[in-house]
Image: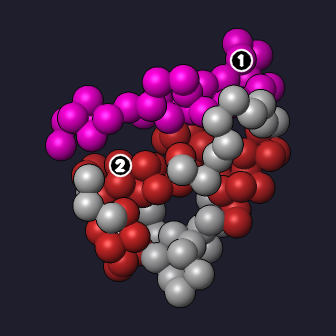
Amino acid sequence: MMELTHILRNFLDGDGKLTAFPAKRKMKIYCLFYLAQKFEAEKDYTEQEINNVLLDRHTFADPATLRRELYDYGFLDRSRDGKVYHIADKQPTPEELCF
């Protein structure tokens, strides 16, 4: 896959933070790949910890949407009660997400 920062150049500020969440599905998925890289593998996160990582990586103050999208597209898994999150063991591929 082409360098994500190059693909997302219109959505990133000088610090590498997302300035907007794209409406187009393909760019949205690229953003999710970009954000998923910001989490440590095999680490458990609370919802607040997930939000804090996301808040550090975007400027539009909507970690709930980003967290939900990361979960819905299979980048994050969570416990049944929704209290513990972690990076999914098997990350989706661009092919699986219909590029």
Residue 18 seen from this side:
yes
- As drawn, is 74 to the left or to the right of 98? right
Label 2, label 1: how far apart the Cα atoms are? 23 Å
Q: For residue 7, which numbered disc appears in the image?
A: none
Identify which residue is drawn at 69% across, 29% down: 42
Figure quadrant of residue 28:
bottom left
Q: Is residue 86 above or below residue 53?
A: above
Identify which residue is drawn at 64% across, 36% down: 41
Range of residues picked out in magenta: 71-99
Estimate how packed mark 2 is, as few (under 14), some (14 to 19) or many (20 or more) residues with alpha carbons within 10 Å: many
Outermost residue, left direction?
99
54, 36: nearer the viewer: 36
Residue that carries the numbered disc 2 in the rendered image: 29
Identify which residue is drawn at 33% across, 64% down: 3
Outermost residue, bottom direction?
14
| x and y, in percent, of residue 75 in the image | 50, 35
| x and y, in percent, of residue 91 in the image | 44, 31
- Residue type pointed to by label 1: Ser
Residue 22 seen from this side:
no
